[in-house]
Image (cartoon, helix red, strand yellow):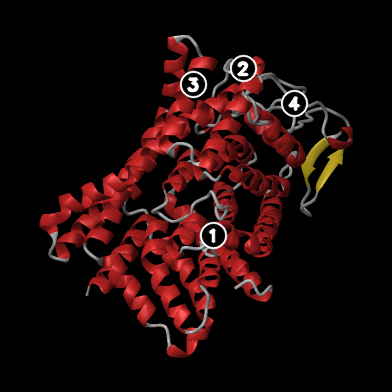
Amino acid sequence: MLTILGFVMIATFLVLIMMKKMSPIAALVLIPALFCVFVGKGAHLGDYVLDGVGNLAPTAAMLMFAIVYFGVMIDVGLFDPIVRGILRFCKADPMRIVVGTAVLAAIVSLDGDGSTTFMITVSAMYPLYKRLKMSLVVMTGVAATANGVMNTLPWGGPTARAATALKVDAADIFVPMIPALACGLLAVFILSYVLGLRERRRLGVLSLDEVLESETRAGEPVLVAAGGEAEDGGRVSFTKGGSAGAGSGSSGAVALGGGAGADAVGKADASGPADADADADDDDGFQGLDPDRPTLRPKLYWFNAGLTVLLLTAMIMEWLPIPVLFLLGAALALTVNFPHMPDQKARIAAHAENVLNVTGMVFAAAVFTGVLTGTGMVDSMADWLVSTIPDGMGGQMGLVTGLLSIPLTYFMSNDGFYFGVLPVLAEAGQAHGVSNLEIARASIAGQALHMSSPLVPAVYVLVGMAKVEFGDHTRFTVKWAVLTSLVVLGAGILFGII
């Protein structure tokens, strides 16, 4: 009974948010509360919720101060050189922009923190997607899938959990899996290329000049020609055939790689007048990273870079708990970069909306996970799934574990899967001669999908900053993320790793 109710509760939650019948935060709270009553344990709802909140409170604190820290780093221009390089590659081509999104997300994911990746990626790429009227779910889908593959780094979480649960070395799990994970990342880049070509075909009838002219007529701010003329000294346009071509002359030329964020609002170019003080309100909250923004601190660049490297090193070496590190880092970054109290308050206020949205989702998710765990639904679902494995599949427990990791790490937290389900799978594998290391390697194959799970707090940073409905993101991303996970698993089996 608990197994059925567990699956029904998860399915009800996903259907309601994908159909936009409820907001994610309301669904995360009300649906598990209702099912807790159905199970007959309504009297214990308060205990379950408090247990869930207690377990996720450190995560909420980490996200809160991480958003402030990296928000300040974005404000002061720490990531502008990386963003500028990616955007110089992207120019005004939708295909390059989608590929650039995947590359940027993969690079920034090296720090092991999904929230950081999504904040930087969206801040850099959102202006381009909005101005060229590209699909925002393409951006969120590509970024989440790329981050999911990179989330398997030893300091990213899943690999460390698998190592702890099965008492093996994290390096012995990760290093042999590098070829398979590289195939997964390659699959993300190929996916971004295909989705980019689709966006290029969809927008192929438009030229960038036409976009600029329509915006000028509507009184909206115009793209800045921050980097000089476009490639080959001419106009960049999208042809009906889908290729980016260069026209003669320099009128209206726009080089998107010239400034941080590459879509700064301000100066006009030859294509028409623009209001230097125009803000984002005319374009659904659109605002690029202005290369002349007053929050830039070029003289403190190396201090901020050193502080960030030190912070990431401390995270990897586990010198202090991650929430404490980000709390100290945020306080130090604010104090040094903005020594005056009004400026500090302004920076905190600027990022308060993201902080509130994300921490609110985390505590709402605490209700969901608290009820799943407290009522015993998670244990019951895991036992049922393991019991359904045929005896003849015992020798293929690596494959079985990899396949199960895809849905289970989506419907459960990583803690629930790695500490609750994985030991049971490993025990079944050992009975058939399959080593714990093989089981552990297979268990990280599903992480590409996991990063879009409604139980992952970082995904709410992604959809919130991109102004994308969670249901739309889920509907678009799940199929591509599952495909990427299957590529990782298939490559692992092909190379003899799993």
Upstream in sequence: badge 1 or badge 3: 1
Q: In which quadrant is the N terminus drawn?
A: bottom left
Residue 336 drawn at (x, y percent): 53, 16
Tag 2: residue type?
A: Arg
Upstream in sequence: badge 1 or badge 2: 1
- Indicate the secondary structure of the residue bearing disc 1: loop
From the viewer's perspective, tell me whether residue 250 is left or right of residue 167. Answer: right
Of the residues tagged 1 and 3, which is closer to the observer? 1
Judging by the rendered image, the residue that carries numbered circle 2 is: 297
- Dot 2, how many residues are within 10 Å of its Cα: few (below 14), some (14-19), or many (20+)? some
Judging by the rendered image, the residue that carries numbered circle 3 is: 332
Which residue corresponds to the image point at 44% horizontal and 56% vertical from the top-left? 453
Of the residues tagged 3 and 2, which is closer to the observer? 3
Q: How many marks?
A: 4
Q: Are marks 3 and 2 in contact (CB under 8 Å)?
A: no
Tag 3: residue type?
A: Leu
Judging by the rendered image, the residue that carries numbered circle 4 is: 225
Residue 341 drawn at (x, y percent): 43, 10
- Indicate the secondary structure of the residue bearing disc 2: loop
Is 421 drawn above or below residue 331 in the view shown?
below
Q: In which quadrant is the C terminus drawn?
A: bottom right
